[in-house]
Amino acid sequence: MSGHSKFANIKHKKEKNDAAKGKIFTIIGREIAVAVKEGGPDPANNSRLRDVIAKAKSNNMPNDTIDRGIKKAAGDANSVNYESVTYEGYGPSGVAIIVDALTDNKNRTASNVRNAFTKGSGSVGTQGCVSYMFDKKGQIIVAKEEYETDADELMMIALDAGAEDFAEEEDSYEILTAPEDFSDVRLALEEAGIPMASAEVTMIPQTWVELTDETDLKNLQKTLDLLDEDDDVQVVYHNWDE
């Protein structure tokens, strides 16, 4: 993935999120609710909830907001039940797009996602039509500007905890794990006091698509912007080489 500064991408995303904190807090709030319903309100016994709390803190979500979300999900039997849905499709020039959503109304979400693809001259495909082009991995990014200790030490902590791969980029270190080992590796880094710019289970493209046509670029950006504005959409993965 030469030419792809993961930390630069994360900083770009964070800047965008800082301009729309309500959106990221809504996303994380739903993830908290689902994690609590699935594994209970105690993060010590619920690794998924632990990971969501870590994500919330890295996005500067206040502790009292996190606690409120956990208590609400745990104590309200009538609270909204969110269902996880995934859509796959194509943008301009065959750019592969995966959309993960949490929704209380699948018809509404499906309609909104289809509309976003259509307005950007793309199309929603069948399940599995593009996901084979991605690898599902736990990905942890440590920024060099926040971690000045020896890289070998960081690598050994990560590998000893179960990481699959460690790579040094220009401005950051990237640690990859199998999805099932992600929580253990993230926890080991947290306990070692290592600051993480990002830590999540994600979909990593195997290949990237470059867009040079101005119309294609505008259409793809239109699709991504519409998906970003939809509260049901949790995350969008694509293989556009930005």
Image (cartoon, rainbow, N blue to C red):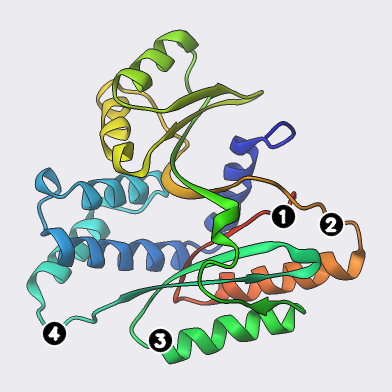
Residue 240's label in the rendered image is: 1
Mark 2 and mark 3: Cα distance apart in space: 32 Å
Mark 1 and mark 2: Cα distance apart in space: 7 Å
* Point 26% across, 34% down: residue: 184
Q: Which residue is mark 3?
A: 106
Marks 4 and 3, the one that precedes in the sequence: 4
Marks 2 and 4, the one that precedes in the sequence: 4
Name the secondary structure under disc 2. Answer: loop
Q: Quadrant of the N terminus?
A: top right
Quarter of the rendering containing residue 97: bottom right
Marks 1 and 4, the one that precedes in the sequence: 4
User: From what the image shows, is residue 148 above or below residue 103?
Assistant: above
- Of circles 2 and 4, which is in front? 2
Mark 1 and mark 4: Cα distance apart in space: 41 Å
Q: Residue 98: horizontal and vertical position, in percent?
A: 56, 65
Query: How busy is the neighbourhood of tag 4: few (under 14 within 10 Å), some, or many (20 plus)?
Result: few
Marks 1 and 3, the one that precedes in the sequence: 3
Mark 2 and mark 4: Cα distance apart in space: 47 Å
The residue under label 1 is which amino acid type?
A: Trp
Marks 1 and 2, the one that precedes in the sequence: 2
Q: Nearer the viewer, residue 203 or 27?
A: 203
* Point 24% across, 25% down: residue: 191
